[in-house]
């Protein structure tokens, strides 16, 4: 049980929203544009939290070290930009969870590694996300997660001590960043975690199997 909490910060993809269908479609279009067979969403979903790096790895077995990676990543970005709100949705329970946080007078915000190029239009297009008090993108600060800088910037903008914040995310780098920022950490297991992922190795302070479970972890003031 977390006590004396004033704010809850969330990762975006795989934690608040299911963007895997649009991310996967953007990568799969690159395959079909090249005359290659289409892959199913099930193949892309486990790597959706890794963004372009994960999608290109699944679609082409390509790593960032490949000389064509920058050009392929930009092509993926263009595809994604054109369709990033087509099939993306809020995870079940997120709306009710955020409403409950507000009723408890707990502030909330978003800290994602997604660049502002995508984060800003995406959050503006979803009224629920547009209500976030702070949104920090992967390029808001000089460092992205797992560096603590984005989380500390979010706390600074909220005017809340990091020690009174919880950070919720579905990737190990989220938990690493939360620890480094001095925040309580919660691993969201309902997002894109594959069956082989051992979240106990992340050393999160807690884990949740659904968004509403978070409410059970926070003591009511």
Image (cartoon, grey):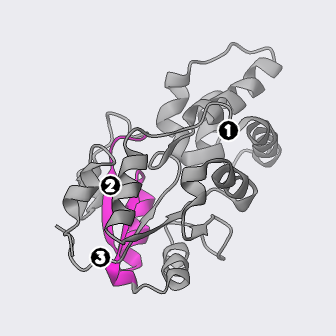
How far across and how far down the image is residue 204, in percent?
27, 62
The picture quadrant where one finds residue 134 is: bottom right
User: Which residue is denoted by mark 1 in the rendering?
Assistant: 85
User: Which residue is denoted by mark 3 in the rendering?
Assistant: 5
Establish if 13 lies above or below 140.
Answer: above
How far across and how far down the image is residue 25, in percent?
67, 27
* Precedes in sequence: disc 1 or disc 2: 1
Residue 77 left/right relative to 112: right
Establish if 96 lies above or below 132.
Answer: above
In 3D space, how far apart are the residues under numbered discs 1 and 2 (Cα atoms)?
25 Å
Task: Return the residue nearer the eye: 212 or 41.
Answer: 212
Circle 2 packing at 10 Å, graded few (<14), some (14-19), many (20+), is: many
Q: Is residue 61 visible?
A: no
Circle 1 packing at 10 Å, graded few (<14), some (14-19), many (20+), is: some
The stretch in magenta equals 162-191
Establish if 176 lies above or below 209.
Answer: below
* Precedes in sequence: disc 1 or disc 3: 3
Secondary structure type for disc 1: loop
Farthest residue, direction left: 1
Residue 117 left/right relative to 175: right
Secondary structure type for disc 3: loop
How far across and how far down the image is residue 133, in percent?
54, 70
Establish if 99 lies above or below 210.
Answer: below
User: Which residue is denoted by mark 2 in the rendering?
Assistant: 187
Secondary structure type for disc 2: strand
Locate the N terminus by quadrant. Answer: bottom left
């Amino acid at each position: 049980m977390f006590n004396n909490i004033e704010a809850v910060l969330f990762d975006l993809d795989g934690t608040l929203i299911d963007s895997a269908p649009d991310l996967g479609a953007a990568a799969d279009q690159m395959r079909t544009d090249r005359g290659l067979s289409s892959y199913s969403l099930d193949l892309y979903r486990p790597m959706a939290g890794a963004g372009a790096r994960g999608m290109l790895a699944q679609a082409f077995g390509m790593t960032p070290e490949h000389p064509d990676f920058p050009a392929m990543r930009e092509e993926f970005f263009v595809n994604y930009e054109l369709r990033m709100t087509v099939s993306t949705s809020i995870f079940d329970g997120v709306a009710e969870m955020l409403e409950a946080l507000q009723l408890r007078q707990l502030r909330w915000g978003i800290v994602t590694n997604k660049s502002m190029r995508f984060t800003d239009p995406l959050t503006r297009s979803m009224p629920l996300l547009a209500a976030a008090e702070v949104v920090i993108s992967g390029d808001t600060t000089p460092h992205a997660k797992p560096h603590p800088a984005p989380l500390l910037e979010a706390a600074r903008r909220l005017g809340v001590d990091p020690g009174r914040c919880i950070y919720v995310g579905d990737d190990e780098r989220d938990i690493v960043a939360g620890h480094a920022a001095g925040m309580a950490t919660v691993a969201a297991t309902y997002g894109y975690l594959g069956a082989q992922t051992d979240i106990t190795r992340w050393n999160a302070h807690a884990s949740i199997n659904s968004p509403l479970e978070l409410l059970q972890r926070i003591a009511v003031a």
